[in-house]
Image (cartoon, rainbow, N blue to C red):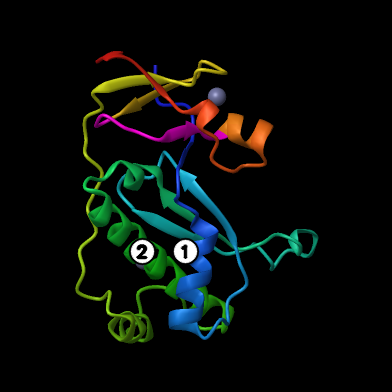
Amino acid sequence: MSALGFLLKRGMDLKKLFDQMNQKHFDGELEVPILTWNSRLEVEAGRFIPPKSQWKFWKDQEPAIEMGAYLLEIDPPQAQEDQICIVLCHEMIHYWLWSRGRPYGHTEEFEEKAQQIGIAEMRIQGAVPTEKYLYECPNCLKNFKVKRRVEELACESCCQKYNKGVYDSRFCLRFVRYL
Ligand SMILES: [Zn+2]
Ligand SMILES: [Zn+2]
């Protein structure tokens, strides 16, 4: 059995954070991309995915930023917010370079922008390798394996289905057992 579901955290609104960072560091230049938490990201903390616009029929596809869902389990809360912010800004630089038609890898230009924002020297915490706790969604009964005791994490698919994708405490995970 593996961690199947996606999570949402109370008070953690990626779009809001994106808007704040966009105003603060990118002059509000960036359009909101698709923003998601990806529970399969462990080695990379996040990634920027450009649309495959070179093919005509995919023209409508939007750029996306995926964030490692494990970031939601970092303790304490202040450290978690910092980490999420650093990872998001890092991916936003890739996106920003791409949107200007620049090479968008870890180029000199990338480093320059990272310096300017103040995230160049900051380390991103990797995922904790072992999963110790089994949780489930009280509604759809989907299983979630997590590395720490978690609070205020809700099942994403149920929040999508019944609450327009916004965190809803009705779908807050409940502890099942130790693994
Ligand atoms: Zn990168
Ligand atoms: Zn659910």
Q: Nearer the viewer, residue 58 or 68?
A: 68
Badge 1: how crowded within 10 Å, few (<14), some, or many (20+)?
A: some
**Residue under pointer 2:** 85
Quadrant of residue 47 within the rendered picture: bottom left
**Position of residue 20 in the picture relative to residue 125 (left or right):** right
Q: Is residue 97 magenta?
A: no
The residues tagged by marks 1 and 2 sit, at their Cα atoms, a distance apart of 8 Å
Q: Earlier in the sequence, mark 1 or mark 2?
A: 1
Q: Secondary structure at mark 1?
A: helix
Mark yes or no: residue 65 visible.
no
Badge 2: how crowded within 10 Å, few (<14), some, or many (20+)?
A: some
Picture quarter with ligand 2: top right
In the displayed orientation, state which residue is furthest to the top: 177
- Decide: marks 1, 2 in contact (CB < 8 A)? yes
**24 above or below 164?**
below
**Residue under pointer 1:** 17
Tell me which amino acid carries mark 2: Cys
**Residue at the (48%, 72%) spot, across then down:** 20
**101 above or below 47?**
below
Residue 171 position in % (x across, y down): 52, 27
**Residue at the (41%, 63%) spot, across then down:** 88
**Position of residue 29 in the picture relative to residue 43 (left or right):** right
**81 above or below 26?**
above
Residue 163 position in % (x across, y down): 65, 37
